[in-house]
Amino acid sequence: MDAVLPSPMPGAPRIDNPGGTSAMKGGDTVFHALCFSAAMVLMATLVGLIVALVIGGWPALSHFGFAFFTSSVWNPSGSPDNPEAYGAAGPIVGTLITAFIAMLLALPLAIGIAVFLVEFCPKRLSHWVGIAVELLAGIPSIVYGMWGLFVLAPWFAEHVQTPLMLNLDPDSFWGRVFTGVPNGANIFTASLILAIMVLPYIATVFRELLLSIPPYLREAAYGMGCTPFEVVRNIMLPYIRKSAVGAVMLGLGRALGETMAVTFIIGNSHAFPKSLFDSGSTIASTIANEFTEATGDLHISALIALGLVLFLITFVTLAAARLLLGTEKA
Amino acid sequence: MAPGTHSVASSSRHARRKLINYIFVGLTSIATLIALTALVMILWTLVAKGFGGINAGIFTQDQPGGGSNLGDGGLRNALIGSVIMCAIGMVIALVIGILSGTWLAEYGDGNKLASVVRFINDVLLSAPSILVGLFVYECLVSHVLGHFSAIAGAAALAFLATPIVTRTTEDILRLQPNQLREAGMALGAGRGLVIRAIIWKASRTGLVTGGLLGFARISGETAPLLFTALGNPFMSFSLSQPMASLPTTIFQFALSADDNWRRLAWVAALIIATFVLSANIIGRALAARGSSSK
């Protein structure tokens, strides 16, 4: 950040035209300045975003101190014997758990899709299947939410949750992992929806990465008599390893901040989730649910402080993703 | 080592490797099938639940109150609100995005500040949209304007679309051959004129595609509108008042117990999904045509 002004392009590869007329030079300077200030608007947006979240969240953060991150008591309606309190541990843990499970589910699928499209699928078909997978990314998040709430959740409650509950001893280990109200709105179904939503992003980047592998590497491996599986496992996947981690982080960033789909299906309870099939909440779903109905200034401030936490988590994730992927890749 | 045993061992090993490979091919095709099934199931649900609810009233009537008869009312206020806010947001995003993308592509080479801006743009591109809503709420709604309004909603959408337009603009401009720039300058045009009159013109298709994809993206956004534009049960053209939009209407209606509201939520979801997916497909077709004609 040492260069604050636009440097006059030393060593730029493109040719400038210093011999233009003075009128043109004036117009050029204005145009250059316009473009430059537009780019600065982007910078100001990010700075403003951070400042706004810090200022807005400060009252709650200073009021509760470190307990804001460790307590899971979320009580917006204060009464004398049960004072108003906000502890974000529940939503923070919910955010991390759902995003993590979603990535566990999406990662093998994404690798499978990318490998299938690059290695095994007939070329003509591969183009169309690739587009179909990318269309999954175009479906708005709220549509995923409705589908999750009205189709996936009832199906899941009837065909997965209920049989598991009936056949498992509630005191056994698995019984405790799978306990919960059998309505299909829980941490796990939220993770399932998230997995479907981030799948196209990861799969598309993986596919581009696999296509960027120099052909002679594959050809050499095939020439030695490797099976396609061995080529993929021993040559191709190791080759893209670093960028692939970046792609995963990119998907993780999306999963962490996803709002509407999760809000529909996670069950929205602020307590610590006790099992895989327990209802929970994420930072984004809490903000979406409560912001417009917030009872007081402290409640609003607590929600903005939650937003700040979400920003920090996603910023670190996305920054890591960009560094691993390099800024040239999508 | 007898030659016979060697060949037996290697052929059984060969069979195992082949088997593992078949299983692997099978697993990758299953993964692809799962993704395609999810897409088909979601689209099928939308059509099955949304198509039957469409009638003329959807486009000519405003949203009904609670407890209305099944089939009454429509989505006119939400449709118009969505179009107004997306259009304003998109115009702002196009101006800022194309200019900053141009700066990154044409003036930014070898410039440290440009890589910082590029990095920030990448972060904004994937930042959670609900945070943009909080940001606009803090800046516009709670301090400058003092209440929820359509202009705040449009601003939130603009913040979401700008990074998309910036990124596409930079990518497209970088695809233009340097000979174009050299030819323009050889005729005596200054750098800015070359960009405006030649480079932008040559990139027109790409820029339109970028704008279309950005528009598609923001038209389905819900979270940032919840606490900026809020929603409005009545038809409103006033930018300083709360305004309805399709996504926030879906959010309100889908979670209600009212059958008619739920019908409208499915219709609205079908409309948005149809629009977003066709914009995606048209954008892709435009991009493909643009690249094949060159």
Image (spheres, coloured by chain):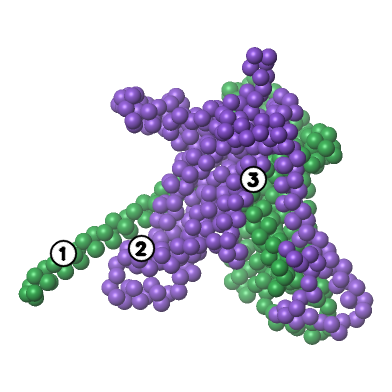
- Residue wearing tag 3: A311
SS at mark 1 in the image: helix
- Tell which tag, 2 or 1, sits nearer the viewer: 2
Q: Provide residue A257's location: percent of width, then percent of height.
A: 59, 44
Q: Chain of mark 2?
A: A
Q: Which chain has been coloured green in this picture? A: B
Q: Amino acid at mark 1?
A: Ser
Q: Residues within 10 Å of mark 3 (few under 14, many from 20)?
A: many
Query: Is A23 displayed left or right of A267 in the figure?
Result: right
Q: Is residue B212 left or right of residue A73?
A: right
The type of residue carrying mark 3 is Phe
Residue reaching furthest top?
A81
Mark pair 3, 1: CA separation: 55 Å
Residue A305 located left or right of residue A245:
right
Amino acid type shown at disc 2:
Arg
Residue B124 at x, y = what percent? 67, 53
Q: Residue at x 81, y 33 (%)?
A: B147
Relative depth, front residue between A243 and B48: A243
- In the image, residue A203 above or below residue A77: below
Q: Which residue is mark 1?
A: B12
Residue B150 position (above or below residue A163) = below
Instruction: Give me the residue at 32% from left, 63% from top.
Output: A229
Q: Which residue is mark 2?
A: A233
Chain A: drawing colour: purple
Point out residue A85 in the picture as x, y percentages from the top left corner.
65, 25
Labels 2 and 3: the sequence-earlier one: 2
Q: Chain of mark 1?
A: B
- Total numbered labels: 3
Give how far across and how far down residue A266 sits, in percent.
52, 33
